[in-house]
Amino acid sequence: MTAETPDGGVDRRGFLKDLLGACGAAAPVLWFGAVSVPELAAQDGSEPYDPTEHLYGMGIDVAKCIGCARCVVACKTENDVPEEEHFFNTWIERYVIREDGEVEVDSPNGGIDGFRPIRDDGEIRRTFFVPKLCNHCEAAPCVQVCPVGATFTTPDGVVLVDEEYCIGCRYCIQACPYGARYMHPEKHVAGKCTFCYHRLVEGKVPACVEVCPTQARIFGEVEKRATPLARFMRFNDVQVLKAHLNTRPKVYYANLDGEVR
Amino acid sequence: MQGYIYPNEFELHWGLLVVLYPYLTGLVAGAFILASLERVFNVKEVQPTYRLALLTALAFLIVAPLPLLAHLGHPERSYEIFMTPNSQSAMAMFGFVYAWYLAVVLLLEIWFDYRREIVLWAQSSDGWKRWMYYILTLGSTDLSEKALKFDDSVGRWITIIGIPSAFLLHGYVGFIFGSVKANPWWSSVLMPVVFLFSAIVSGIALVLVLYVVTTMFRWRKVDMKCLDKLAQFLFYALVVDFSLEALDFIHRLYESEESIEILRQLIESRLFISLIVLQVVMGSVIPLVALALVSPGLRKGGILRTPPELRQLIYIVAAVLIQIGIFSIRWNVVIGGQLFSKSLRGLTVYKVELLGIEGLVMTIGLLLLPFVILWVLVKVLPPWTDMDAQSAEPQPTSQGRAHESYQ
Amino acid sequence: MCHRPIADRRATSNHRTVACEVCHGPAAAHVAAPLDVKPDAPRDRGFCPLCHSYNPSRPTGFPQIDTVTHNARVPCIGCHDPHAPEPPIPPTSCGACHGQIASQKLVSHHAGLDCTTCHEAPEQHRLTPRQVRPTKPVDRSFCGTCHAAGIPDVPQIDLRDHGQPYVCWQCHYPHRPEAR
């Protein structure tokens, strides 16, 4: 029975207790029904995973995000992200654009704690939620600046950090234009979203994609046809964040407002 | 915190230790370039400071990597920068520039310049000092005319290579910041150049102060011609440095890119004291005006004629203000660049700790350590050119040392 | 394959895109030892509002309720099967889902107008809102049925000249037409 916190949220301890029984960052394996987990490839264990056969990307439909932050919670649980308030692999931002053009942005504890009521909500022009995460750029500035090569791009397009090699200089954190990286307070190495690589090699989707209740996050492969991402890219006008920096992100946003940074 | 910052930006990543590092390497580059003025460009007046400048550069260069090592998450793995460097990373390549500069330029130059004296000191000392000097000769005890001429010409060549190396040493630090396109406060073509010229300014100012202080401690008379020449070069360097910074400022204001609004808030609120007051007014304008008036930079003998004691005092005050100003530049660049969010919508704060590895106490300790090392170096390899017959150290003679001159 | 009936019921319901673990938490341990480790099952009113409490930043039409007044004190699962959450009684007022629009209209000159005055909403829209949509007026003459028909106490305009060539709602927000 999950305990209720005073503001009506779910007690995170309950979530975590379930995970303690699992080994390390074991992926929640789905056994229920054909509808649920999209399988990226037939990973029945018969062939070893070949990273050169894939190139992953993510699509986010801003118009579908309801700001429930289930993705943020799932990511923190799945990837052992520190629970303190300012370490996130992914987070939700709320934008409130008023009639006079003024823009307010907030992200209380990444969205996990819910969002405060908007003051004066009669004067709102538009308001929406934007999920953010590492964009796994094709020309990642973080990879470029790492002095020892501890952060690298895999053949399947995922930017990872080798925690045994990172010297903790924090240059990659400075170089990331999207604020996607942080310094792990205990391991003293750089941390970030890994697209749940441990799940990808088993043919599953990242935890945030799996738990999104409105399918605001679409995961797939950038260069293939038979992938949900291909349909997403074809049917939506997509943008990337900070395109002028030419980092060539692989997270594509549909219905992205011009005010989003 | 005001406005909006990305959740991960709550923590400021490069703190006091990383502010200290470009300050220290800047002093190295500046002191060396001052030394090269005498050696390569034959500016005879500053000869009394030649060896002092080299030893100062060495003392600061030894300390420079310490704040970096202390700041790393895993300093025990830091050797990997040399073993498996990422050739695309400015930080990795800088490790080699530093090593090159330390070994090939600075150590070799000092050794070739001092070799004759080291041999003489080895011959005239007793006990452990004799052994120390003997080891320092590295076995090369030939004092013939040919050998000394060789020393001199090699030293000259090393200095010639050393000047662009010194430019590279500190320009590279500027490049490490200037090449980060994610940060609009750092990303600038001018960053390496501004860093370099501010380094030259701080180096000359430091050697000026050290020269006066050490001369006073040794109860000798300060060579005013030397001091005036130092002040003259300091003035020229400061003019260039200030012009470059003003250019950067005007350029940003004129182009008025998207980041201008948050940067304006940054300067008006978080950086007002460190930038407007310390860097610009106290660190640049006041020394500029003072040096313009009393140094021989604009007019021989100075625009305002002043008695030497007063002029000396003005030089020292100006040099100290400049040090504060240059340290403020490093602070404004490193800390300033992290005080605003990359979302361009908010500002945050940096809380300096007192104790702890990034604390004030550690920083002050690391600032004092080079002076301790310099004291040791000065004891082992005295750089003074005005020693009298009473001291045990032999006086350098003019034999084979065409570049020296005496008061 | 274990919980088949629940999975089948969910697969055709409004929660078909909601993964089991969204509500039941990470369940790898349960899969490894089904009898020893049981997942959580939120049964109180605190959990469902994480998604379904009214929030103006949520997309229009996403089912949202006022957590204080909506069937106060009754647990959500008392009326809604979480695996097939279609409401037992389809919402009677449009404002049940379209909260922001309703709140705007309530303080406007159009407060006395039903939504159905301008929009035709088939019954099916309450059950599958995204598949079957209400109609919207398409031309100026629609607004003219009140505003160019000489009705007393209703602001009148000359339909041929006023604001040509635009349609009325390009300037006048129909749910709060007096807003500036």
Image: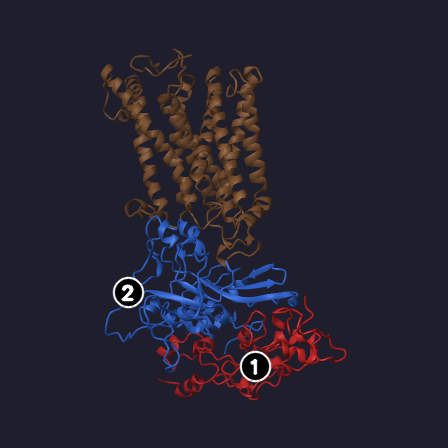
B244, above or below B208, in the image: below
Q: Which residue: 47% across, 84% down?
A: C13
B350, above or below B137, in the image: below
Rendering colour (chain C): red
User: For residue B318, which quarter of the picture?
Assistant: top right
- Residues marked 2 and 1, same chain: no
Report if the CB atoms under discs 2 and 1 are less than 8 Å apart.
no
Residue bearing the label numbered 1 = C135
Q: State which chain disc 1 sits on.
A: C
Residue situated furthest front in the rendering: C160
Q: Nearer the viewer, residue B196 or A29?
A: B196
Q: Percent from the top left, x then y, of residue A72?
A: 47, 67
Secondary structure at numbered mark 2: helix
Residue situated furthest top in the rendering: B389
C82, above or below A208, in the image: below
Rendering colour (chain A): blue
The C terminus of chain C - image quarter: bottom right
Mark count: 2
Q: What amino acid type should be assigned to the residue bearing mark 1?
A: Thr
Q: Percent from the top left, x then y, of residue A35?
A: 39, 81
The N terminus of chain C - image quarter: bottom left
Q: Is residue C166 visible?
A: yes
Q: Is residue B350 visible?
A: no
Rendering colour (chain B): brown
A124, above or below B44, in the image: below
Drawn side of residue B343 relative to residue B38, left or right: right
Residue bearing the label numbered 2 = A51
Q: What amino acid type should be assigned to the residue bearing mark 2?
A: Pro
Q: Percent from the top left, x then y, of residue B224?
A: 49, 16
Q: Percent from the top left, x then y, of residue C21?
A: 43, 76
Quote the CA–CA distance across marks 2 and 1. 49 Å
